[in-house]
Amino acid sequence: MSDQPQSRYAVEAIPDGDNLFRRVPENRAFPNGKPRPGAFSDKGKGMSTSWSKYATASGCRGKPPTCGVAQLPVAPLRALRLDVTHTPRDTDQSHSDVIGEKDEETRMVLSNMALVVHKPVSTKKK
Amino acid sequence: MPRAPKDASVADLGEWRAKASDAEKQSAYRNAPRQAYPGSHDDHAHDAMMAMMGRLTSSLAVYGDKFDELFADVDWGDDVDYGEDVVAPPAEVRAEAAVFLKRLARSSATKLGIALPLPEISPTVDGNIDLHWGPGETRELLLCVRGKGKASFFGKAQNGKTIKGSADTDSDNMYLAAWLSEK
């Protein structure tokens, strides 16, 4: 999160050609695994993601690894006038924030733009 | 001459007539399938309204059941820990979304003659509720109920038309239904 205290890791510039991973809980995904617009919202000052330089998609699934993972290319995010910033934490060097208004139009675009890397695993009790 | 469905009662028709504006009555007449209702001008309007009332009462009857099912079926994530960034919508926001949707559907049906499609309902990561009509279809509308009477929305159509703004969830907001039903 962008309002986190300084990390022991240096803040780096994220190139346009890199990707971010966004965790997608089961109840924020369409049945085909694609993230719903509701998967993209701010918490604090930005939307938390993991930079592909220091993270793998599999590593973003949570514990237990049941969440889906969507991949967001950096350049199109910036084209939406969203600020992509490396905000490492002591426990997570990959942590990055996507800062900027996530109104319904932007969330709809993000939902369409996202590439499904992992579908969520259903945890619903039958 | 075709008759209105059985569930269009005279009382319903009378209520509609009493509340409908002249423009709404004219619209009901204009939108009636002419060939199906031969006869005088008044017969046309009367039968068209009877037919429409039948459709509306049927729709509302369906909505009554579907609304409860819709909200009961939503996975709010109450019993799952998805991580620090994910919060479930509080009960008051869920209640507000349900009331808003029912009001929108009812007003659209009774005042505009529009049978509102049922949206997909899902929580957002930050504890609000998305009502999503027509994802991936030619006309799509995403409305986020944010609590305390506030909502915001964005819609886009395949023909390039868009709609965007904020809404008061205590109001009818029938323009949203009108936009969704535009051809």
Image (cartoon, helix red, strand yellow):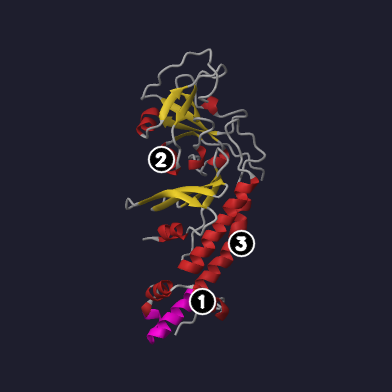
> Does residue B43 show up magenta in the picture?
yes
| Residue range corresponding to the magenta coloring | B35-52
Give the foreground label among 1 and 2.
1
Q: Which mark is residue B65?
A: 3
Q: Is residue B41 placed above or below A68 in the rendered structure?
A: below
Amino acid at dot 2: Val
Q: Give x and y (percent) for residue B108.
A: 49, 64
Q: Which mark is residue A109?
A: 2
Amino acid at dot 3: Asp
State the predominant SS element of the stretch in magenta: helix
Amino acid at dot 1: Ala
Q: Is residue B92 left or right of residue B106?
A: right
Disc 1 marks which residue?
Answer: B18
Q: Chain of mark 3?
A: B
Q: Give x and y (percent) for residue B9.
A: 56, 78
> Does residue B181 show up magenta in the picture?
no
